[in-house]
Amino acid sequence: MMLTRFIAVLGLAANALPGEVVLDRVAVVVGKRAVKSSDINRDFRITAFLNKEPLNDSPDARKKAADRLVDQQIIRQEIATGEYPRAHDSEATELVNQIRSSRFAGSDARLVSELNRYGLTKAQLQEHLLWQLTVLRFIDERFRPGVLVVDEDVRKYYDQHLAELRKQYPQGNSFETLEPKIRETLEGEEINKQFDDWLTASRSRIWIEFHTEVIK
């Protein structure tokens, strides 16, 4: 396919060695914004770290990272346009502390060492978690007001899932006890559906151009 737009960006890739200049090429064009090869490199690394998975540098992993970054560019634009609030640094710091405590016995040295193994820094982890929190806040504020779960749906869910609910909550599984949890579950499912529908529609309205020779 003939390229109708071309954007050249020069920079240092995230995994460049000291003194080594690397061409940081545009991997995807999203409207008037660019996703660079270093963005993809960082995304699949931090995704693997958070999911406790081996580092996967395959073309498929890079393509999935590129798709995620397209979605993030669309969300960033919506957050900026709608002036939605962003998460605070202290909230991201708390998540970093939780990861350090649960996975590395509270050792900052072990956390940093594992991040280094994935080619990441603690600052990159903090920045990524800050963005995740901002996205979650945006989704809740943008879509929750339009969600309505009626009592009939809550009762229907309870009746249909009663067997598994009794296993999950053996000490308190009456409808009255579980009604708030079920309502919250159904609200969450509807919020996710509305968000997915919005994101799909938004992707269909914006110019997206993948430079496959950069991604692979």
Image (tube, grey):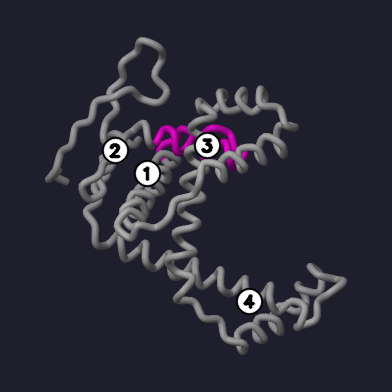
Could you tell which of marks 1 and 2 lies nearer the N-terminus?
A: 2
Disc marking residue 126: 3
Q: In whole angstroms, how far apart are the C-alphas of marks 2 and 3?
A: 24 Å
Could you tell which of marks 4 and 2 lies nearer the N-terminus?
A: 2
| Mark 3: few/some/many CA within 10 Å (<14, 14-19, 20+) | some
Disc 1 to disc 3: CB gap under 8 Å: no
Disc 4 to disc 2: CB gap under 8 Å: no
Element on which disc 3 rests = helix
Residue wearing tag 4: 183
Residue wearing tag 1: 66
Hey, what amino acid is under mark 4?
Arg
Q: How many marks?
A: 4
Give yes or no for residue 53 being in the magenta stretch: yes
Q: In whole angstroms, how far apart are the C-alphas of marks 4 and 3?
A: 32 Å
**Position of residue 6 in the picture relative to residue 178 (left or right):** left
**Position of residue 21 in the picture relative to residue 158 (left or right):** left
Residue wearing tag 2: 27
